[in-house]
Amino acid sequence: MNNQKDDFVIEMLNITKVFPGIKANDNITLQLRRGEIHALLGENGAGKSTLMSVLFGMYQPEEGVIKKNGEVVRINNPNDATKLNIGMVHQHFKLVEVFTVLENIILGAETTKMGFLQKQEARKKVEALIERYGLKVDLDAKVEDITVGMQQRTEILKMLYRDNEILIFDEPTAVLTPQEIDELMEIMRGFKREGKSILFITHKLNEIMAVADRVSVLRKGKYIGTVDVADTNKQELSNMMVGRPVQLQVVKEPAKPGQVVLDVQNLTIPSRLHHNNAVKNVSFQARAGEILCIAGIDGNGQSELVYGLTGLERPSSGKVLVGGDDITRASIHKRQAYLSHIPEDRHKHGLVLDFTLEQNMVLQRFREKQFEKAGFIRKAAVRSYAEKLIEKYDVRSGQGPVTMARSMSGGNQQKAIIAREIDRDKQLIVAVQPTRGLDVGAIEYIHSELVRERDEGKAILLVSLELDEVMSLSDRILVLYEGEIVGEFDPKQTTVQELGLYMAGAKRMDPSQMSVFKQEERKETKNEQ
C-alpha cells in the first residue's frame, strides 16, 4: 500500500536545508497520505517550520526533492505552492493590520474585470466558505481590531479562498484559547472528511492524540521516525521528541505564602477598543512564596490588567502597590526595579527583533555598572552574560549571542525572554502565557524554574489560557470574567469543568466566599476604626 504511486499526495525526500551556523533540516523524508492529518512533532528549533517553509516555497533546499502525486515538482516561491494547491497558516500570521478581514483574504488572488476589483463576487465566495466551515468572522473589521483567534480564522479562509487541497498549519494553537482550540480541531476533522490533506506542526501532545492519524518526529534537525497515533502514547512521543523521559506533571511542594508583595486595590482600567472599562474595580493580593493565577477566556480583561500592573496602560482609578510602595503612576522604567514581566506578545513587548540575542538579554540592564563604563557598553561583559543565560536556559540559535532575534524559532525567542526576566531577580514576576509555543521539555524546565523562584520567596502572578497549566502550576486561582473577579479557587479542590463554568460567566461566587473580598472588608474596618 505504502509504495503505491497514488497513496502519497506529497513526498519530501531527503531534504537538507542549511543556514549560517546550523543545519536546520538534515536529510529528512516526510510522506503525506491523501486525506490524512499528519502531525509534525519536535522541540523548539527542531526544524519543523523550516521543513514546511521549504514545502511552501519560502526556502530552497540544498538537497532533496519534492513530489506531488508521484511527480517531481519545483516550488520556487509561495505562488508556485498556491498553483499546486498547497496553502499555509504561519505561526506568526501574515496579515496586513490596516486592511479589513475581507481585503486580507483576497489579497494577491483578487477577482478583477476590466482592471476593476470585483469585491462583491469575492465577498459571496468568502461568505459561502464561512457558512460551509463555520468560520465566523466580521469581514469588514480591520485586522488590528480583532482577536488572535479571529486572525487565525482569516488565515484559514485565505487558504480556502485559493482552493488549497494540502493545508499546512504551523503551530496553529499557540495563541488560541481552549475553546478556540476545540473549534479548530473540529474544523480540521471537517477538512479531512472532505478529502483534504493536512500537515500539522505542533508540540502539544494532547492535540496530536486528539486529531492526528500519524505523527513524524524531528529532533535537532534530524528525522527520528513516523508512528501511527493509535499505536502510541504521550510519554512515548515526548521521549522521541526530547530524547529522554520527560516529567509531564509539575512537581512541587505545597506553597508557604509569606508577606504581601503585590497589593491591587480597586483597579479600573479603560478598554482601548470599546467605550467601557476592561478591568472593573478589581482587588487582590499576591504573596511571597505563592503562584497566583489569573484564569479566564481570552479578552476578559487579563491583558489590560497586566498592562496596568506593568505600566503599559494607565488605570483610571485604584492603586497598585509592590512591596508596600505605590507604583500606580510610576513609569515603566521605574517599575523595572520592582517586577519582572514575561509579556504575552513576545514580538511586540518582549524583544527588539532586529537586535542580536545578546543585546536583547541586557535591554533593561545595559546601564548597570557591570555592563557600562564611562558611558560605553562593555561588550565583552554583555557577551559573557548572554552566553551564561543561553547555556543555562538552552536557548538554541544558529550563531549564539550574535544571532538576530528575528531569525530564531518562536519557542527559542520565548526562552530568551524568560531567561532574561527570571535572572533579573525581582520580588514579583508577572508571567503571561510563559510557555506559549514551547515544547514539553522546555515547558518542564520553565515550570520548574517558576516553582524554584516561588520557593525562594518570590511572588508569581501567572496569567494563562492553558487550563492544564493553570491547574498544575498554580497555588491559588482567580477567575476573571468581563473584567471582574468572579471566583477564587484552590486547584487541589476544583475541576477544569468547574473553572470553565466561571470562565464562561455561567456561575459567579458570592463575594463572602472569596478571601479577595474579605481583605477588602478588613481594610474598610481598619479605616473606620
Image (cartoon, rainbow, N blue to C red):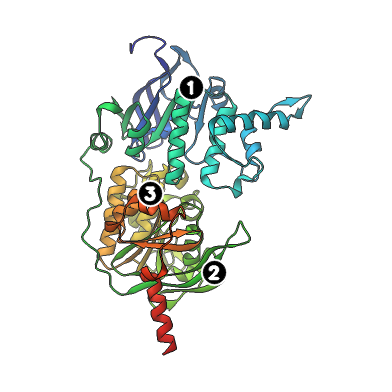
Distance from the alpha carbon under mark 2 to that under mark 3: 27 Å
Residue 202: tell me if it is visible: yes
Q: Earlier in the sequence, mark 1 or mark 2?
A: 1
Q: Nearer the viewer, mark 1 or mark 2?
A: 1
Residue nearest the viewer, comparing 31 with 359: 31
Q: Earlier in the sequence, mark 2 or mark 3?
A: 2
* Residue type for callout 3: Glu
Q: Nearer the viewer, mark 2 or mark 3?
A: 3
Distance from the alpha carbon under mark 1 to that under mark 2: 50 Å
Residue 360: tell me if it is visible: no
Q: Check whether the beta carbons of the residues at disc 2 and disc 3 lie within 8 A of each other.
A: no
Horizontal and vertical percent for residue 22? 36, 36
In the picture shown, does residue 343 fall above or below 96? below
Dot 2 corresponds to which residue?
315
Horizontal and vertical percent for residue 349? 49, 55
* Residue type for callout 2: Pro
Residue nearest the viewer, comparing 286 with 325: 286
Residue nearest the viewer, comparing 411 with 360: 411
In the picture shown, does residue 251 fall above or below 226? below
523 to the left or right of 228: right
Residue found 31% across the figure and 67% down from its top: 458
Dot 3 corresponds to which residue?
466
Residue found 38% across the figure and 40% down from its top: 398
* Residue type for callout 1: Glu
Q: Residues within 10 Å of mark 2 (few under 14, many from 20)?
A: many
Q: Nearer the viewer, mark 3 or mark 1?
A: 1
Dot 1 corresponds to which residue?
194
